[in-house]
């Protein structure tokens, strides 16, 4: 009976252990985990137990030579994603450029963002899998399919970087502007990331330290291999320095970074400038078809300071509102006269242009002009679908009625147009004949400016970006410039010279916040309905608050990092003591056995 009780006792303990084991471990276990990461990384899903774990050398020479390619592809793809995400203000312009070349309107910017995101996610996944394999002590072997794809990622990223450096150099200015806004948050996030990285780093460094101590202890027990073990100890110390020193130098730089950090959105509240005014870019093109009366009325409803448009002249001398150099995108010309869809707008009579529909492309098209645009109400949808191409005089009547400023780009007619040499004179006469107050006109075209000053002295002259000396000489106190020029010292020299600055095209809240914090008086925007709701700049903080968060983050991160290193040191010390006691016990048994043999 006692024997039977002893047999049933282990069985009951086994049942109890199974009962206490979490349910997830019944499905997933360590072998399953290791097999999964090996399968994803090496595409070897059926691996013999004895071939899974290969301690010692982390990988072959060929793998060590290829691993930098994986790191390079990861860095390039992540940098491209970051650049394109920060260029979200330009997505609509990018889609328009692709439309000009292909004739197909689509969210090409989002397609490119998704593609780059997939590349970054793929390379990130391979890096994480490689790290996990090293953590498990398994030799790295990247499958040849992954190697080909990694090389392809490098080629694709190199192609995009070539485009950026050759044709889109100003995109780096957008990245620089975004860093001015997000610098405090990137700084704090980087410190948090260093705390997370300190866990595997501490594990590895303390593990190397423990191995060095064990080898030093073994050296006293075995003097014959002293020289060899000294070399191993030197390599272990060098590896500790090579890994640990850069980490702590980067951490120190992050701790001190705010001393040299500048962000326009970190300033005292009483020094914050008034909110910039809005010029509705072609009206409010997210609420109504661009360059239509509905669009301009929507801009007025949302508090526009002025209305921005584009002017062409018809073949029979009627100035009208249109941006593109053909009628494909914003009218139904393909349905009415498909063979003339690529003809310049100035080669059509106004009688024909006035019959075209300028709103169904906006209200009834399956793909909207802006990604994430809110759906229209039924009334707005019906109204938008009935919009026509407006004359310039219709815009001037609305501006005079609402007391809004008007600024426009003036496009010259086709070479064989009868007003090719006199279109500026004709447009000025049309404006004067409309009886609009001259002060409401911001005259932007740079050609024949002296004639315009003489003919319409009440027009407010607006220039492009020129030197302060030239603007002062021409007696111009307003400029209309690309927002990317804000990167150059915030355009302080122009503000110091009392030159009013209008930035175009500002759609993203973070970019509008930067303009606001940089004391810019006005911006041109597509997104007036969102920006008008902002009561203060996004990502705004006072210097005292930033100082408090900075010091608090430094202290907390230092405490966490020290605690992480101490935890790994304590854990390694326990292993070292256990190993030493085992080693002493083994040596004692060996000596006793040797003495016993000598007596025999």
Image: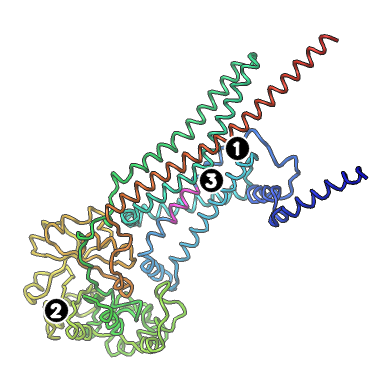
> Is 131 on the left-hand or right-hand side of 441?
right
* Image position of 226 (left or right of 251): right
For mark 1, give the secondary structure. helix
Instruction: Give the camera-side residue of 378 and 533.
Output: 533
Q: Is residue 368 left or right of residue 122?
A: left
The CA distance from mark 2 to mark 3 is 61 Å
54 or 59, which is in the foreground?
54
Which quarter of the rendered picture does the C terminus lie within? top right
Relative height, residue 238 to residue 143 (above, below)? above
**Crowd class of label 1 (few under 14; some 14 to 19; many from 20; radius 10 Å):** few
Q: Which is closer to the viewer, label 1 or label 3? A: 3
Between label 2 and label 1, give the one nearer the viewer: 1
Q: Which residues are magenta?
A: 73-81
Q: How is the image coloured?
A: rainbow
At a point 59% along the width and 28% down the height, the residue shown is 211
Can I make out residue 317 in this image? no
Q: Position of residue 228 (x, y in %)?
A: 60, 19
Residue at 69% x, 26% y: name it.
582
Residue 542 found in image quarter: bottom left
Q: Which sits in the foreground, 254 or 424?
A: 254
Q: Quadrant for residue 311, please give it.
A: bottom left
**Outermost residue to the top:** 599
Residue tagged 2: 428
Give percent across and percent down for residue 275: 23, 67
Q: Earlier in the sequence, mark 2 or mark 1?
A: 1
Please tell me whether mark 3 sits on a helix, a strand or a loop. Answer: helix
Query: Is residue 76 magenta-colored?
Result: yes
Q: How far apart are labels 1 and 3 at the CA level?
A: 13 Å
Task: Please name the residue that numbered disc 3 is placed on.
Answer: 70
Residue 442 horizontal/vertical position (percent): 16, 73
| Residue 510 in sight | yes
Q: Give the labeled residue for mark 1.
A: 62
């Amino acid at each position: 009976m006692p024997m039977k009780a002893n047999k049933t006792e282990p069985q009951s303990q086994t049942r109890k252990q199974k009962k206490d084991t979490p349910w997830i471990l019944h499905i997933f276990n360590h072998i399953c985990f290791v097999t999964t990461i090996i399968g994803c990384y090496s595409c070897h899903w059926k691996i013999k137990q004895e071939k899974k774990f290969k301690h010692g050398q982390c990988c072959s020479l060929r793998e060590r030579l290829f691993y930098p390619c994986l790191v390079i592809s990861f860095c390039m793809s992540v940098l491209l994603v970051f650049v394109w995400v920060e260029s979200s203000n330009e997505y609509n312009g990018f889609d328009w450029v692709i439309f000009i070349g292909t004739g197909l309107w689509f969210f090409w910017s989002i397609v490119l963002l998704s593609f780059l995101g997939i590349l970054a996610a793929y390379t990130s996944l391979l890096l994480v899998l490689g790290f996990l394999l090293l953590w498990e002590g398994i030799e790295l072997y990247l499958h040849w399919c992954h190697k080909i794809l990694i090389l392809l990622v490098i080629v694709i990223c190199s192609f995009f970087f070539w485009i950026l450096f050759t044709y889109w150099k100003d995109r780096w200015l957008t990245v620089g502007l975004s860093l001015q806004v997000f610098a405090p948050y990137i700084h704090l996030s980087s410190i948090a990331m260093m705390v997370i990285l300190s866990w595997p780093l501490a594990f590895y460094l303390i593990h190397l330290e423990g191995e060095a101590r064990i080898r030093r202890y073994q050296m006293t027990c075995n003097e014959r291999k002293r020289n060899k073990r000294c070399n191993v100890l030197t390599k272990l110390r060098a590896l500790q320095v090579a890994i640990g020193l850069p980490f702590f130098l980067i951490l120190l730089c992050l701790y001190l970074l705010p001393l040299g950090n500048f962000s326009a959105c970190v300033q005292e509240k009483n020094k914050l400038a008034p909110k910039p005014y809005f010029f509705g870019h072609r009206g409010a093109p997210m609420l109504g078809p661009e360059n239509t009366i509905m669009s301009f009325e929507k801009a007025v409803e949302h508090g526009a300071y002025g209305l921005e448009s584009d002017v062409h002249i018809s073949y029979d001398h009627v100035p009208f509102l249109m941006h593109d150099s053909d009628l494909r995108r914003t009218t139904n010309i393909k349905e009415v006269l498909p063979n003339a869809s690529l003809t310049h707008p100035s080669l059509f009579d106004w009688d024909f242009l006035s019959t075209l529909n300028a709103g169904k492309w906006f209200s009834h098209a399956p793909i909207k002009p802006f990604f994430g645009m809110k759906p229209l109400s039924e009334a707005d949808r019906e109204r938008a679908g009935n919009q026509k191409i407006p004359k310039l005089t219709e815009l001037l009547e609305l501006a005079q009625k609402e007391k809004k400023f008007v600024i426009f780009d003036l496009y010259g007619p086709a070479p064989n147009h009868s007003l090719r040499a006199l279109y500026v004179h004709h447009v000025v006469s049309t404006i004067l004949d409309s009886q609009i107050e001259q002060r409401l006109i911001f005259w932007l075209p740079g050609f024949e400016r002296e004639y315009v000053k003489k003919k319409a002295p009440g027009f407010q002259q607006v220039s492009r970006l020129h030197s302060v000396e030239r603007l002062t000489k021409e007696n111009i106190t307003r400029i209309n410039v690309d927002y990317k020029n804000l990167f150059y010292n915030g355009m302080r020299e122009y503000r110091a010279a009392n030159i009013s600055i209008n930035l175009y095209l500002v759609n993203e809240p973070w970019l509008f916040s930067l303009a606001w914090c940089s004391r810019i008086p006005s911006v041109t925007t597509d997104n007036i309905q969102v920006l008008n709701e902002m009561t203060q700049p996004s990502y705004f903080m006072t210097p005292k608050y930033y100082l408090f968060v900075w010091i608090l983050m430094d202290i907390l991160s230092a405490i966490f990092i020290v605690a992480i290193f101490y935890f790994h040191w304590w854990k390694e010390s326990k292993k070292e003591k256990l190993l030493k006691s085992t080693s002493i016990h083994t040596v004692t048994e060996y000596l006793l056995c040797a003495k016993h043999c000598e007596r025999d």
